[in-house]
Image: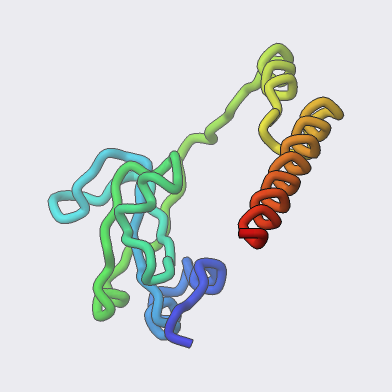
Amino acid sequence: SSTVSAVSCARFAKDCEQCFAHNCRYCRTSPEDWSFINGEPPSIIDYACLSKTWQCIDLQQLRPDVVSVEAIAYNGCGNLLPPKGPTTRLTTTTTTKEVEVIQSEGHPWWPAEWGIVVWTAIAILGGFALLLCCYLGHRCRRR
């Protein structure tokens, strides 16, 4: 099919030519604020292969670590620099208090988290709506 899933395109993030061969879009990314057109490349470079339903600029919304993006032309695969990671190791720390807050917040709107009161209210409202529809349908047929 002409539509390629995001998952199948993502497999070719390290292979520009295969990305284009599978009808995908190839993008250069960096967590640094940088214009890829001018000057030296940033110290951290990565690549992404996206389904054509996405634009490279969308990576700035989809990935929190992406600040700069550039679309690679299908004939530009031979001129790419290899991916470069950070020269210092990035570390993140999470305190026990932060973990407790994250765990306690949960997602109360998700059905698995709803209690018996919510399900009872849904059943009563659903039953009332069904009875109302049956009553109105029966009444309209009698006319």
Query: In terms of image quadrants, where is residue 108?
Result: top right
User: 117 or 43, which is in the foreground?
Assistant: 117
Instruction: Tell me residue 88's x, y (percent).
Output: 49, 35
Q: In the image, is 126 to the left or to the right of 78?
A: right
Query: In terms of image quadrants, where is residue 79?
Result: bottom left
Q: Which residue ends up furthest to the left in the rendered image?
A: 38
User: 53 or 141, which is in the foreground?
Assistant: 141
User: 46 or 141, which is in the foreground?
Assistant: 141
Instruction: Tell me residue 75's x, y (percent).
Output: 25, 80
Q: Which residue ends up furthest to the top in the rendered image?
A: 97
Residue under the image location 40 percent in, 75 percent down: 24
Query: In terms of image quadrants, where is residue 107?
Result: top right
Q: In the image, is 24 to the left or to the right of 142?
A: left
Q: Is residue 140 above or below residue 89?
A: below
Q: How is the image coloured?
A: rainbow
Q: In the image, is 49 to the left or to the right of 100?
A: left
Residue under the image location 24 percent in, 73 percent down: 73
Instruction: Tell me residue 54's x, y (percent).
Output: 37, 63
Q: Which residue ends up furthest to the right in the rendered image?
A: 116
Q: How many marks?
A: 0
The quarter in which the C terminus is drawn is: bottom right
Residue under the image location 41 percent in, 85 percent down: 21
Q: Is residue 37 above or below residue 111?
A: below
Residue under the image location 44 percent in, 39 percent down: 64
Q: Is residue 70 above or below residue 117?
A: below
